[in-house]
Image (tube, helix red, strand yellow):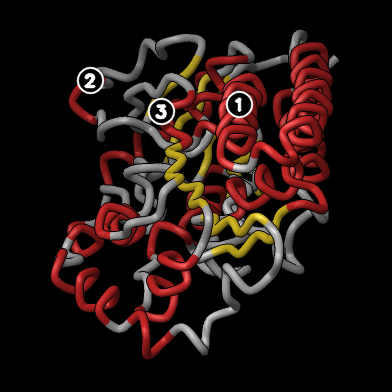
């Protein structure tokens, strides 16, 4: 991660909490909705809360549509809103300013999605096979990869944990939360089956992405993700890394360089042009915008599957 993202002093979060009384009238406030108020850190968490909570929850996302979630610096108004809510659903270590605000808050129900499944270390190269031409995969590991929602199996595990947390925090609607969770997990299981069947037989198993967001998805379906950048979507690749990618693309029959909707496509298109490759969108689903290929998580994942099938030569 970029160093500047970690320079969110704890005093800022404390000061924001001190401003609670001044900001409370401005927030879309939790506590005033008459429902179980959930503050979600960014889209994949908000989607879970909405799907599981249904009509019984009021969900607010700290990350605006189109905003790169890694860059979020939580405001005093948002911290006040967080303090007034019944629950917060977030993914620890993805957004440092959210972590700080949650730690400083007195909110009773804090749900860390990262604690509800298993996280792994991923670097620039990750997946179902170790490319022979990658001489240094270990020294590029950048810590635990937070992009668990892109693996339908892990996302379902998180959904089950969130459902149980909602049941405990709002027992009056526990039956509804249990039923909604079961329905969501069933849909995620079906999505997993689609990915398994759709990517079983392909000409190549290697794909190139802008940043290393698809490691869990790659491992789940026996693929290898080669990322231009690491886990930080805005870092710049070295000349050596670009050269390695171009050699790898030729060796592994790669046809496409994928870019995403919330960060610049310049580097991906430059590498693709230099290597004679196509470009396409593979969406990490960190937010839904007008540019997204679908209106929600499932629709965008279906589009991702189609894009991968086309790039990998699915049969």
Q: Nearer the viewer, mark 2 or mark 3?
A: 3
Distance (Cα) linking label 2 and label 3: 25 Å
| Residue indicated by mark 1 | 151
Mark 1 crowd level (few <14, some 14–19, many ≥20, 10 Å Cα):
many
| Residue indicated by mark 3 | 115
Residue located 25% across and 79% down the image? 18
Q: Earlier in the sequence, mark 3 or mark 1?
A: 3
| Residue indicated by mark 2 | 138
Q: Position of residue 62 (x, y in %)?
A: 51, 65
Q: Nearer the viewer, mark 2 or mark 1?
A: 1
Specify the quadrant of the image occupied by residue 9: bottom left
Residue located 51% across and 47% down the image? 89
Q: Earlier in the sequence, mark 2 or mark 1?
A: 2
Residue located 72% across and 40% down the image? 172
Mark 2 crowd level (few <14, some 14–19, many ≥20, 10 Å Cα):
few
Quadrant location of the C terminus?
top right
Does residue 205 sit above or below 52 in this rendering? above
Viewer-proximal residue among 25 and 70: 25
| Residues tagged 2 and 3 counted as in contact (Cβ below 8 A) | no
Q: Position of residue 108 (x, y in %)?
A: 41, 48
Mark 3 crowd level (few <14, some 14–19, many ≥20, 10 Å Cα):
few
Viewer-proximal residue among 63 and 159: 159
Q: Which mark is residue 285?
A: none
């Amino acid at each position: 991660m970029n160093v500047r993202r970690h320079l969110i002093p704890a005093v800022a979060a404390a000061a924001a909490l001190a401003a609670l009384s001044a900001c409370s009238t401005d927030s879309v406030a939790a506590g005033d909705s008459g429902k179980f108020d959930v503050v979600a850190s960014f889209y994949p968490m908000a989607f879970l809360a909405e799907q599981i909570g249904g009509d019984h929850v009021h969900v607010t996302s700290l990350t605006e549509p189109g905003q790169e979630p890694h860059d979020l610096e939580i405001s005093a108004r948002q911290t006040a809103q967080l303090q007034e809510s019944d629950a917060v659903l977030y993914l620890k270590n993805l957004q440092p300013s959210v972590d700080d605000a949650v730690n400083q808050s007195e909110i009773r129900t804090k749900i860390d999605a990262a604690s509800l499944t298993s996280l792994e270390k991923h670097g620039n190269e990750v997946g179902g096979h170790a490319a022979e031409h990658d001489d240094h995969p270990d020294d590029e590991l950048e810590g635990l990869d937070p992009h668990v929602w892109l693996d339908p199996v892990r996302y379902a595990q998180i959904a089950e944990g969130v459902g149980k947390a909602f049941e405990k925090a709002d027992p009056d609607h526990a039956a509804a939360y249990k039923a909604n969770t079961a329905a969501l997990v069933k849909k995620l299981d079906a999505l997993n089956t689609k990915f398994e069947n759709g990517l079983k037989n392909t000409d190549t198993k290697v794909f190139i992405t802008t940043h290393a967001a698809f490691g869990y998805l790659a491992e789940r379906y026996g693929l290898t993700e080669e990322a231009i950048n690491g886990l930080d979507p805005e870092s710049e690749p070295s000349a050596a890394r670009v050269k390695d990618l171009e050699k790898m693309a030729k060796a592994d029959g790669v046809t496409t360089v994928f870019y995403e909707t919330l960060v610049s496509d310049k580097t991906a298109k430059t590498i693709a042009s230099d290597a004679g490759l196509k470009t396409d969108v593979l969406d990490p689903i960190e937010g839904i915008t007008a540019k997204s290929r679908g209106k929600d998580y499932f629709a965008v994942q279906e589009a991702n599957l189609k894009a991968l099938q086309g790039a990998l030569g699915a049969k």
